Image: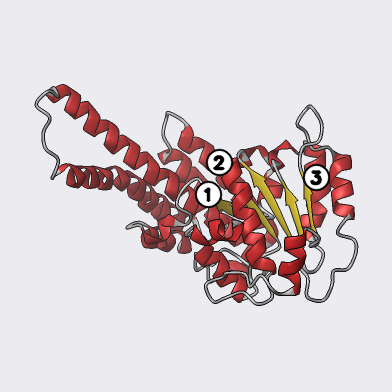
Amino acid sequence: MSSQIFLDDKVSTYILNSLRSNMSGQAWLVSGADVDYLNEFVEGWIDVMICLDRAEDGTPCGLCKACKRRQLGIYNCNSLKPLSLSRSILTDHIRQFIGKFAYKPLPWEVKIGIIYEADCMVEQAQNAFLKTLEEPPPQTCFFLISNKPDALLDTIRSRCRLLNLNRESFSYLNTTWFCELQEILQQTKPGSGINNAWLGATRLNALIASLRTQAELEVMNDLEGEEEDENEKAGDRKKRIELAIKTKSLEERDSLINALELWFCDLLKLSQGLSSSQCFEIPWASDICWDRALKAFEDFQNLKDNFKAPMGHNEAIVNFLSRLCKA
C-alpha cells in the first residue's frame, strides 16, 4: 500500500504532526533522485491526508467516505504531467489544470492537485501558476514532484513547503550542529546591524569548518574495530580513509545547506503568518516584511551556488549576512 510507504519514511512523523495541528500547508515541493519513490510517497501521503478517521499512527481507516472514493478512483484528485514529446508542461496545460479547482469541494473533502515532473513547466507556465500558489482555493492541497527542483523559479519554490527525500528527511534535527546553527540564525535577524552580521559569519564559517573535524572523528571511530588488511598498502589505506572523511564531511555540509534553505523558506512563510515546517523557532519572523524575507530567500539561493564553487564560501557567507543584517 502507498500509505505504508509514506508511514515507513521517518519524515512522516513531522507531516502527521502538522496534519493534526491543521498546519500542513496547501502547497508542497517534494524532491529527490528516485522519482518512482517520490510518486509513491506522495500517493501514500494523500491516502493518509484525506482519511476522515485515520488511526493515531496515521494509518487510513479504509472505510470512510474519502477512503472509499479513493479506492474506487473517484476521489477529487487532479494530476498533470508532461504531455508532449518535448516533455514540457505549457501554459495552456497549467490553465486547464487550475480550472479544475474552480468548483467548491464537498464539506469534508480536500481537493488534491499533483504536478508530476514539475520542473518540466516552462517559465510562462510557472508564472501562470504563481497566483494559484499565492492564494490557493480553500480545502485544496497541491503537490509538485521533481527530481530537479533547482529548475523551478525561486518564486515557485518560495511559495511551497520544501521536502527533500534524497536524505533521511530532517535528519539534521538530531545532528551535533543543529542547535548552534539555529542560535546563529536567530541572532542574525534582518536589519539587526553589521556587528551581528560579522559575529554570525564568523560563527557560521567556524561551524562549517568543524564538520571536517567531526567527520574525521566519526570515520576513525568506525575504523577502530576494523582488522587491518595485510594486502593493503599503507598509502592505499590512507587514501581510503581520506576519501571516507571527505565523503562524510560533504554529506554533513549538504545537510547543513538543506537546513539553511528550510530556515529561510520558513522565515518567508512565517513573515506572512503562513504555516511552516515547525523545525525551527524564529520568534521575530512576524516582524519581517514579505519583501525583505523574499530577498533573504533569493540571496540564499545565490549563496548556495557559492557552496558548490571550488574557491570556497567564507567570503560569500560574510557578504550574504552583511546584506541580510544591513539596517
Which residue is found at the position 52% from the left and 41% from the top?
304
159 relative to 213, above or below: below
Frontmost of labels 3 and 2 is 2
The residue carrying pointer 2 sits among few (fewer than 14), some (14 to 19) or many (20 or more) residues within 10 Å by Cα, namely few
Q: Secondary structure at mark 1?
A: loop
Q: Which part of the image, by quadrant, shows the N terminus? A: bottom right
Of the residues under marks 3 and 2, which one precedes in the sequence?
2
Q: Secondary structure at mark 3?
A: helix
Mark 3 and mark 1: span between their CA atoms?
Answer: 26 Å
Expressed as whole percent of the image width and height from the top left, the position of residue 52 reads 69, 75
Expressed as whole percent of the image width and height from the top left, the position of residue 150 reads 62, 39
Q: Nearer the viewer, residue 52 or 326?
A: 52
Of the residues under marks 3 and 1, which one precedes in the sequence?
3
Residue 122 falls in image quadrant:
top right
Instruction: Give the residue number, with chain letter if any, for mark 3.
Output: 127
Instruction: Give the residue number, with chain letter if any, for mark 1.
Output: 165
Which residue is found at the position 66% from the left and 47% from the top?
145
Mark 3 and mark 2: span between their CA atoms?
Answer: 27 Å
Instruction: Give the residue number, with chain letter if any, for mark 2.
Output: 34
Q: Secondary structure at mark 2?
A: loop
Q: Nearer the viewer, residue 6 or 304?
A: 6
Which residue is found at the position 27% from the left and 44% from the top?
215
Q: Work out whether residue 271 can be spotted.
A: no
The amino acid sitting under disc 1 is Leu
Expressed as whole percent of the image width and height from the top left, the position of residue 74 reads 81, 60
Circle 1/circle 2 CB separation < 8 Å = yes
The amino acid sitting under disc 3 is Asn
The residue carrying pointer 1 sits among few (fewer than 14), some (14 to 19) or many (20 or more) residues within 10 Å by Cα, namely some
